[in-house]
Image (tube, coloured by chain):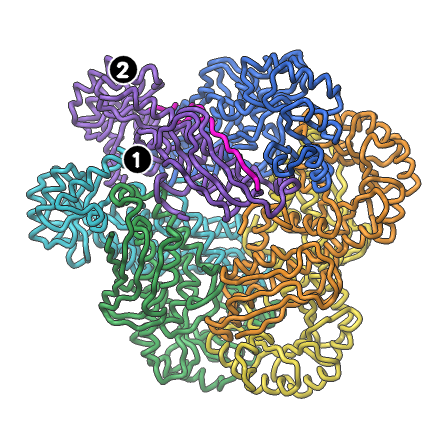
Chain colours: A green, B cyan, C purple, D blue, E yellow, F orange
Amino acid sequence: MTAFGRGGTGRTSWESIVELALAEDVGTGDVTTLATVSAGATARGTMLVKAPGVISGLEAAAYTFRRVDSAIVSRPLVEDGATVEQGTVIAELEGPARGLLIGERVALNLLQRLSGVATLTSKFVAETAGTRAKVVDTRKTTPGLRVLEKAAVRHGGGHNHRVGLADGVLIKDNHLAAVGGPDRVTRAIQSVRALAPHTLKIEVEVTTLPEVEEAVAAGADIILLDNMDVATMREAVRIVAGRALLEASGNVRLETVRAIAETGVDLISAGALTHSAPALDISLNFDIT
Amino acid sequence: MTAFGRGGTGRTSWESIVELALAEDVGTGDVTTLATVSAGATARGTMLVKAPGVISGLEAAAYTFRRVDSAIVSRPLVEDGATVEQGTVIAELEGPARGLLIGERVALNLLQRLSGVATLTSKFVAETAGTRAKVVDTRKTTPGLRVLEKAAVRHGGGHNHRVGLADGVLIKDNHLAAVGGPDRVTRAIQSVRALAPHTLKIEVEVTTLPEVEEAVAAGADIILLDNMDVATMREAVRIVAGRALLEASGNVRLETVRAIAETGVDLISAGALTHSAPALDISLNFDIT
Amino acid sequence: MTAFGRGGTGRTSWESIVELALAEDVGTGDVTTLATVSAGATARGTMLVKAPGVISGLEAAAYTFRRVDSAIVSRPLVEDGATVEQGTVIAELEGPARGLLIGERVALNLLQRLSGVATLTSKFVAETAGTRAKVVDTRKTTPGLRVLEKAAVRHGGGHNHRVGLADGVLIKDNHLAAVGGPDRVTRAIQSVRALAPHTLKIEVEVTTLPEVEEAVAAGADIILLDNMDVATMREAVRIVAGRALLEASGNVRLETVRAIAETGVDLISAGALTHSAPALDISLNFDIT
Amino acid sequence: MTAFGRGGTGRTSWESIVELALAEDVGTGDVTTLATVSAGATARGTMLVKAPGVISGLEAAAYTFRRVDSAIVSRPLVEDGATVEQGTVIAELEGPARGLLIGERVALNLLQRLSGVATLTSKFVAETAGTRAKVVDTRKTTPGLRVLEKAAVRHGGGHNHRVGLADGVLIKDNHLAAVGGPDRVTRAIQSVRALAPHTLKIEVEVTTLPEVEEAVAAGADIILLDNMDVATMREAVRIVAGRALLEASGNVRLETVRAIAETGVDLISAGALTHSAPALDISLNFDIT
Amino acid sequence: MTAFGRGGTGRTSWESIVELALAEDVGTGDVTTLATVSAGATARGTMLVKAPGVISGLEAAAYTFRRVDSAIVSRPLVEDGATVEQGTVIAELEGPARGLLIGERVALNLLQRLSGVATLTSKFVAETAGTRAKVVDTRKTTPGLRVLEKAAVRHGGGHNHRVGLADGVLIKDNHLAAVGGPDRVTRAIQSVRALAPHTLKIEVEVTTLPEVEEAVAAGADIILLDNMDVATMREAVRIVAGRALLEASGNVRLETVRAIAETGVDLISAGALTHSAPALDISLNFDIT
Amino acid sequence: MTAFGRGGTGRTSWESIVELALAEDVGTGDVTTLATVSAGATARGTMLVKAPGVISGLEAAAYTFRRVDSAIVSRPLVEDGATVEQGTVIAELEGPARGLLIGERVALNLLQRLSGVATLTSKFVAETAGTRAKVVDTRKTTPGLRVLEKAAVRHGGGHNHRVGLADGVLIKDNHLAAVGGPDRVTRAIQSVRALAPHTLKIEVEVTTLPEVEEAVAAGADIILLDNMDVATMREAVRIVAGRALLEASGNVRLETVRAIAETGVDLISAGALTHSAPALDISLNFDIT
C-alpha cells in the first residue's frame, strides 16, 4: 500500500477521510455482524453498477476494506475513469466475511459519490466537445474529500483548478475591496507578485470589460470572468487575444455550458461538478462461504 | 467552546471533519489573502440565504471560523432548524479580515450541504403529514459528516435511525445468508439477543410476509420491509398489529413517500435525505474596514 | 492484522490504548535492553498462568508485541474465555529478543488486568447459576480500556450493558431531577422517545415501587431498580410481570448476588467486575538465543 | 490550563488518556442527557468521599469536565495528597448541566482509581514508619495512566521508581541471560555504562549474595534483591554497607512490608500499589437549576 | 490565538513541530524544575540577542510558551524581520516560573535557528543589491520546519520558491530521463501542461543552451539553469530575452552570488539559506519572584 | 519494520518527524512526477557521499521511502557510524519510480543533516583522544529530531547527555536562583533528592570553586562547570578527586576542546554538535526503467 501520491488517484492524503468514516460508522463495533457471522467465515463479493456512468474511487474503496481487515483482497475489473454500462461488474472482493460486511457501507458511500462526480463531469465535458474550453472544478467540494473529488473530476475528463489556497492565487472581489482605490486590480496584482512564490500564476476575478483590460495590462496570467453574459465574454476573448487565460465562472449548468464554451474562453469552472453530483448507484453482493 | 455533545447539533465529535476540511483547503497558507489584506484589517460579514429552506450547520460554521482565528465572533440570527425565506440574513460575523476570508469557503461548504439535507428532509416530512410515519435517515451519509448530517435530518423534522453499527442491530440479507437455513430469521434474532447489549432493540430486514410473521414470532422489535409494494406493506401492517415497529425502506422518493406513509408503517427510511440533497445556496458578503 | 471489529474481542478500536501504553513505557527507548541484548538476538517465550482463572486479552497482548516489532510471532494455546488451571502455558512467543523484552511489561499489564476481569466475572456468573439473571457490566471501567474490559466480561460469561452514552438510554436520578414534577418519570421517557433513534431501548432508574409502576405505564423497556432491598425487588418483579426488563443495581457483591438473582430480576449490574477485579498473575519467561 | 508539567501531578502528558476515555464513553453523543436536560440548564455539584482515604486526581477530574465544556468551573476544597475522612466534600463544580452529566462518569472513574492508589500507598508507608526504607512503585501500572498513577503514589507518601524504560537502567534476569557467562553481572553493567547517558544510575537485579558482591564490585548504583527472604536481605545490607542502594522486590504485601523494611534496605517496590489498589468510593451529587 | 495563516509568519500549520519538540524535550516531566521551583512562583524574562542579525520566529517562540502554560505572556519588542544589534532585548516574558523554565529550551532552539536563516538570507540579499535577481529558497529545509523557515527567508529579504511538491512544477533531470527521447524537454512540458492545475507555472531544469532554447519554445514559464558557469548563464539571459523567468541554481555561495546576479537572471536559489545557516545566539534571562 | 526502539538508532519514536516532513513536502501531491513518470515505471537508485564523513540516518531514510511506497526496498551498504571516503556508495534503492522521486528530498534532508552531526562529533572525539573526557551532546537539538540527532552523536563516537527533561536532573542557575539563599546549592540538591526517582543521578551547574566544594559535600553525582577557564577546571578536578563526575560546558569549540579535555574532566558537552553541524553532501542518482 502506498501512503503518498501514487497511481490513478494521484494526490494525497485521503487516507484520513477513510479513517474518519470508518470510525464514525463502526464505532465500538458491529454487533449484528459479530452475532450472525462466524469469525472464520469468508465471502466473495461483486460490485455491480446499476446505472451507466464513469467510475472513480476504486482505490479508496479498496483501501477502506484493507483498513477493516488487511486480509481482504480487492480486484478492480475496470480502471478509475472507465465509462461503464448499467450491469457492469467493476470489482471483485474476497476475504473474511465479517470485515467485508463491516466495510461495505463506507466503501460504497465513497465509490458512489466519487463516481457521481466523474459521471457529471463527463457530461459537461461532452457538451464542450470541439471547443478550446477545459471544464474545471472549484473549491466547493465535500469537506474532507477534496483530493478524491479532484481526481474524480479528472477521471470524468475535466481538469483541476487549484487544490487549495496554497497552490494558486485567485484575487476575488473581497480581496479587491480590501486593496481599494480605482486602480485596485493593478495594485492587488502587484502585491501578490511581490509575496507569492514565482511558481504560481496570478488569477484575478473581474466583472467588467475595463477591469479585463486593466488585468491584462497589470500582467495577470489568468482572468476570471464572474457571472458575465455570453456576449460580454465573447468581447473579453477578443480584447485579451491570448495575452492571458480566460476562465468563465458563475452558475454554470449543463444547459448553458456549450454556449459559454463557444465564446472562446479557455476554462469553465463549475461548482456543480462537486456539490451537486447525484450519486451513481452501485451495489455490493456477497456470497458467504 | 464545547468539545462534546452540546446544543442543537447534539452529538459529538464533528470537530475532526472541520480540522480536515481546513487542512485540505488552507494547506501551507492563503497566499492571495496574505498579499492583499493587511494583518490588522477587520471585517464584518453577513450570511444571506439565496433560496427558501431549512437551516442547519450554524454551529459547525461558527466553529470553523473560530478555528481559523479565535478572535472571530459569529452571531447567529436564527437557530438550526429554522425555516427561512429567500433573502434572510441568518448570521453576522465580525473579526480579523484575513481569518474571515480564509475560513469562508469551508464554512459555506458545510453550511450549504447541511442546510440542503435539512431542507430536503422537511419536504419528505411535509409529505407525510397526518400519518403515523416518521421519516428517518440511513447510513448513506457523506463520509466524515455522519453526526452533522444526522442533526440536519432532525433540524428538518425527521428522526434518526442508528448512528452507526454500534448503536443499533439491523440484521440484513447478508447476515441472514450467513446464518442460513429455513429458520434463519429466527436463529439470527436469537444469536443477536445472546450477544448484544440489552439496551439495543433488534431489527431484521425481510422481503416477504411469511418472514414478517417469523420475525414477529421470534421477538423482533423492528421489522424492515425491504422494497415491498404498497399493498404488501399494508398487509404487513395488518399482520403485525402493533407487535413490532415497521420500517419501510428501498428507493423512497418524494413522489412515493405519501403512499408509503398511508400504509400505516411506523418509519420510512430514505438514503436520499443525505446522499442526494442539493445544497442550499448561501452567500457571505464582507465589509472590510 | 485487523483494525476494526473482528474476532474474540469483537469490538473496536482498542489499538489506541496499546499505542498510549507503549509510548508512556518505552519513551525515548529502552537503554538497558539496547546495551545488553544484541540487535540480532532472537528469543522464545512462554506465558504461564500462576493462578487459576479465565483468560482475556490474548489478542491485545499479541498486538502489543507486533507494534513493538512486526517480526514477533505470538501463538495463543488457548482462546480468550478459556478457564485454565495454575501452571497452564497460554501462549508462546518468538522473535527478536529486543522487541520481546521491550513489549513484555505492557503486554502483561493488559493481559493480567483483563484476565482478572474475566475471572471475577466468572465467579459472579457461577453464583447466579440456575436463575434467569444475567450478570452485566457498567461504565465504571478503566479509562481507555472500555472495549477490552467489556470483552473480558463476555469472556467470563457475563453480558454487556451499553458500551457508552450513545448506544443506550439510561435515565438516571439527575435526569429525572432536571425534568422535575410529579410525573417526571413519564415525561422523561416521552422526551427521550421523541429524540432517540428508534433502535435504542429506553431504560429508567427508579427507587420506589410506585415509580416502577409509572415506568411500566409510560412504556419503559428496562427498569433499573436502584439499591432496593431483596424483598422490594421481588415485589417489583411481581408487579412488572414481564412487561419490561428489570435490572438490579447498587453495591452488588459476590456475597449478595445470589439472593438478588433469586428475586427474579433479568439483569444484575456490578461495577466491581471492572473497577475491583484483582489482576490474574501471569508471567513471561524467555529463552534468548 | 497547562499542557506540560505543572503542580501537584507534576508530570505530563496525561491529557491523552482523558481524551481517550471521553471518546470511548461519549461516542456520538449522550442521547439521554440531550433529551432530558435543556441546553440552557446549569447545575452545581459536590464531590463527596464515602470512605476514609487519600485523594489524588483532582486536576485530572477538573480537566475532564473542562474538556467536555470549557464553561464548567471546578473548585477543589482539598489538595491532592490530602488525607480525608468519610463524608468530606472534596470539590465543588458549577456550569452547564449537560456537560456536568456527560463528564461525570469519566471524571469519577479517574478520581476513584487514583485516590485508591494513593490510599493504598499511604498504608504501605505507614507500615514502614521509622525505618530507612522508601516505598516505591513499579511499571505494573494501568495502561495509559502511568504518569497519573505515579503522582498518586507520591500523594500517598511513596516515591517513584523510573517512569519508563528511558529514565532508568534496570538490568533484569533476561538481560543477564542475554549477556551470559559467569561474570554476566559485571559485563552487563559495563555494557550499560558504555551506552547509557551518564545521568542515569545503573540498577541490577540479583538473586544471591555472591551476585550482590559482584554487583557492588562492578559499580552498580542500585541493587534489586529479587524475592530474597528477610534474613538474606539483612545479610545483603551488611555486605553492601552503603556502597549501593538496595531495593527489595517481589510479592511485597501490607503484611510483610514492615519486616522487609526492618532489614535496612533503602527501597521497597510493590506492584500492588498500582495493580491491586481498590477504588476509593467517591460520589457526585448535582443540584440542577 | 490563530491556528491558520495569520501575520508575520503567514503560512500554516507549524504548530505540529512545536508540539513534537515539546513532547520530545519534556517527556514525562521536568523533574528538576518541579523539585526546585514552587508551584506558585512567577518570573519575568528577557530575550537578549548576543550577535547582530535578523530576527525570525518570535511567534513560534511565543506559541511554545503558551502551549506549556497558557498563563505565560510574551511581549515582542521588535517584529519578525527586524535587523538588530548585539545586545538588543527582543522580547519580554512573564508568567509562572515553572512553565517559563520548561519551555525555554524549545523556544530558543526555534528562535535561534530561524533567526539564523533570516540573518544568512539577508547577507545573500545584500550581495545582490542593485541587480534584478531575487534570492529564493529551496526544499532543502529542516524536516518539520518548512513553513517556518520559508517565513524566515522572507524576513531576511528573500523570496520563496514553491513550498512543496504540490504548489509548483519543477521538471528535473530524473523526470526528463523518465520521459526520454531527444525531445524530452518539450514532451515533459506538454505532459505537465495536460495534467497540472492551470494555476501553476511550469519550470524545467536544463544544463545546456540548446535545452534553454527548447524549453522556451515549448512554453516553459521558468527555466532553471543547473550548475552553469557565469558566461553561459549570461548567454542564456540573452537568448531568452524575457520570454521566461531564469533561475540560477547549484552550489550558490555568498562569495559567488553577486557574479551570478550580475548575469541578469531573475532568481537565484540557494539551499544554504536553510541547510547551512548558523544559529543566531540568543539568551533568555529570568528574574524569579 | 519496527516501531519502537531497535537497532542502530536505538531510540524511539522518530517516525513522527518523518510523517511531518513528508506531509509538508508532498502536500496534496507531486504534480510533476505524476505527469512525467508513468505509474508502472520502476527505478534503481544509489546514494553517493560527496565528501568524507561519518554516516548516520540510514534507517530514517529507508523508513521515509517505505512510508511513501511500501514497495520500495533500501539496501544499506554501510552501517550507521561508518567512516566513509568521498565517492562511497552508501545505499542502493529499488522500487516504483514515482515513490522514489517523491521521497528523495525528505530522505536526503534527514540523511545529510544526521551525517553532518555524526561527522562533526567524530572531529571533537578525535581531538580528545587519549584523555578521559567523553564528548557529550546537549538539548540544543533540532526541534523534532532529538532522538535521531542523539543517535548521530553516538555514531560519531560521542556519548549522550540526558535525552530530555525527564531522564536526568540538571540544576541550573535559574533553579538555584529560585531556591535562593547562601546554601542554595545544598538545598536544591536536597529538594531534588526528595522528589526525583532514585534511578536518576543529580547534576548541578556551578560557576565557582566554593560551589564545587558545596556540591560535592551535598552529594551531587555530577557537577557541571559552567564557562570556567582551563586553570579553574583543573583545580576543580583536583578538589573533587573522583567524588563526582565533572562536566565542562560553555562555548566548547573544536579549537578549545583538547585543552579542556586535558584538565581531567570526565565529560565535555557541546551544543555545536547539533546546532552547528554543516550537512554532509550526499546525492541520490536514479536509473529509471
Mark 1 falls on what kind of element?
loop
In the rendered structure, the answer to whether residue E184 lies left or right of residue F284 reads left
Calculate the distance from the C-alpha at mark 2 to the C-alpha at mark 1: 27 Å
Chain identity of mark 2: C
Residue D105 visible in the snapshot: no
Q: Amino acid at mark 2?
A: Ala
In the rendered structure, the answer to whether residue E167 lies left or right of residue B221 reads right
Q: Residue furthest front?
A: D182
Q: Amino acid at mark 1?
A: Gly
Query: Looking at the rendering, which quadrant does residue F174 occupy?
Result: top right
- Residue lying at 8% horizontally and 51% vertically, measured from the top left: B232
Q: Is residue E256 above or below residue C259?
A: below
Residue E244 belongs to magenta span: no
The residue to which callout 2 is attached is C259
Say if mark 2 contacts mark 1, CB within 8 Å.
Answer: no
- Residue lying at 70% horizontally and 54% vertically, measured from the top left: F81
- Residue lying at 83% horizontally and 35% vertically, measured from the top left: F206
Span colored in magenta: C270-289
Chain identity of mark 1: C
- Labelled disc at residue C168: 1
